[in-house]
């Protein structure tokens, strides 16, 4: 049986061009980028060219890019790095209840360390309001961190407006851009961002490499202490092959309009062919590849398994919390009842998906939902 992948918000396959670059750097460019000899300099050149490529794609300068081990480290570096440098006391941080655990749990840790944290809710459309952020700003606020696009719903947050409010109050603004950076065009200057996280494995680079954009002038404490790598913002021998792959993946062009059409085809078919379904979150401010759908009376986990048995990989809630039975914290923060949150499924498309795969998935969803409702005692009233 063939298996098809519709879980690109969890991770993506390595793109063929990136794989070639990766194996080439691993085999040929094995020097330590800090060494002064031929091998070290070759590694340094590859690293710096990757840095320029990442910087150029998001409208930053190369000195503003810190390579990390991924999105989680980039988020942690931003949150702790800024909060720990802030001299005001008491300190206050603003975030939202729909953040990825990489930001959510970093902020919880700050809270345990005595920092006050405001957790803003989202509307039923999945959007955090810029006015709410503005109202939450206090004299003690040292950081605002609100994600760019949500990994579960795909809803794109009003980061430019939030950035404007943050700028006016002179508070650094970090955005977790892991679902957007490398996929859609992003310009950190036009958006007015101070810090921005990206992660390679969400867009065709391997797992274990990411980057944090740190605007010039932002004071950042390091998380990792050791050698003087990355301008003393991140110690450790650089992952040259990973960074190079990240740079390569950033410069791949992909037709997201085609992908949006596939996503819409999938969504429309499910909404019309499966009774008791609705989309979670805004359909206007949304990533082109994501659809989060509620199936009334069906457990999301059961749907994931039913689709997997039919050859289609999707997700319920975020991948990081699957295995746990808790309903999605994102959907709960949007005001969904726990049973509605539990009956939601995320479809996330990527460059490998085709119209044939989408049509196969539609059939699988229709038959899977019918099967689950036949065997489930829950009575459906639509
Ligand atoms: C995947 C993801 C992360 C974590 O990135 P890793 O590279 O897997 O550590 C952080 N934020 C968002 C929004 C994500 O989707």
Image (cartoon, rainbow, N blue to C red):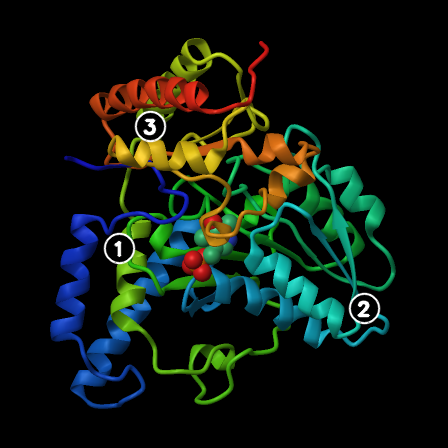
- Give how far across and how far down residue 326 sits, in percent: 58, 47
How far apart marks 3 and 1 lie (CA) works out to 21 Å
Mark 2 closeness class: few <14, some 14–19, many ≥20 residues within 10 Å? many
Residue that numbered label 2 is attached to: 91
Residue that numbered label 3 is attached to: 259
How far apart marks 2 and 3 lie (CA) works out to 43 Å
Secondary structure of the residue carrying numbered label 2: loop
Q: Residue at x 30, y 70 (%)?
A: 47
Tell me if residue 332 comes above or below residue 68 in the rendering.
above
Mark yes or no: residue 59 visible.
no
Discs 1/2, front: 2
Tell me if residue 169 comes above or below residue 305 in the rendering.
below
Q: Which image quarter: residue 173? A: bottom right
Q: Residue at x 54, y 42 (%)?
A: 150
Of pointers 2 and 3, the one earlier in the residue sequence: 2
Q: Which image quarter: residue 8? A: top left
Q: Is residue 139 left or right of residue 212?
A: right
Q: Which image quarter: residue 312? A: top left
Secondary structure of the residue carrying numbered label 1: helix
Discs 3/1, front: 3
Q: Which mark is residue 248?
A: 1
């Amino acid at each position: 049986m063939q298996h098809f992948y519709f879980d690109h918000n969890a991770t993506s396959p390595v793109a063929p061009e990136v794989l070639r670059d990766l194996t080439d750097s691993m085999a040929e460019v094995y020097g330590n980028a800090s060494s002064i000899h031929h091998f070290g300099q070759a590694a340094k050149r590859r690293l710096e060219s990757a840095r320029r490529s990442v910087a150029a794609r998001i409208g930053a300068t190369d000195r503003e890019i810190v390579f990390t081990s991924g999105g989680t480290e980039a988020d942690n570096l931003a949150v702790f790095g800024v909060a720990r440098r802030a001299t005001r006391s008491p300190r206050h941080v603003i975030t939202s209840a729909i953040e990825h655990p990489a930001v959510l749990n970093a902020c919880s840790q700050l809270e345990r360390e005595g920092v006050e944290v405001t957790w803003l809710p989202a509307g039923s459309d999945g959007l955090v309001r810029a006015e709410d952020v503005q109202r939450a700003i206090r004299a003690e606020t040292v950081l605002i961190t609100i994600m760019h696009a949500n990994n579960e719903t795909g809803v794109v947050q009003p980061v430019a407006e939030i950035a404007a409010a943050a700028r006016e109050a002179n508070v650094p603004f970090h955005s977790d851009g892991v679902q957007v950076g490398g996929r859609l065009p992003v310009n950190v200057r036009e958006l007015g961002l101070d810090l921005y996280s990206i992660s390679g494995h969400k867009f065709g680079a391997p797992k274990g490499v990411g980057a944090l954009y740190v605007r010039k002038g932002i004071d950042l404490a390091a998380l990792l202490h050791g050698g003087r790598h990355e301008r003393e913002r991140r110690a450790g021998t650089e992952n040259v092959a990973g960074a190079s792959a990240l740079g390569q993946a950033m410069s791949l062009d992909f037709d997201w309009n085609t992908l949006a059409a596939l996503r819409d085809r999938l969504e429309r078919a499910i909404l019309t062919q499966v009774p008791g379904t609705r989309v979670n979150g805004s359909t206007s401010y949304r990533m082109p590849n994501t659809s989060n759908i509620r199936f009334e009376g069906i457990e999301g986990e059961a749907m994931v398994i039913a689709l997997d048995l039919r050859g289609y990989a999707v997700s319920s809630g975020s991948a990081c919390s699957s295995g746990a039975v808790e309903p999605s914290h994102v959907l709960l923060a949007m005001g969904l009842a726990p049973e509605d949150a539990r009956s939601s499924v995320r479809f996330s498309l990527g460059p490998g998906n085709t119209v044939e795969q989408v049509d196969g998935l539609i059939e699988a969803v229709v038959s899977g939902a019918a099967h689950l409702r036949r065997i489930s005692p829950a009575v459906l009233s639509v």
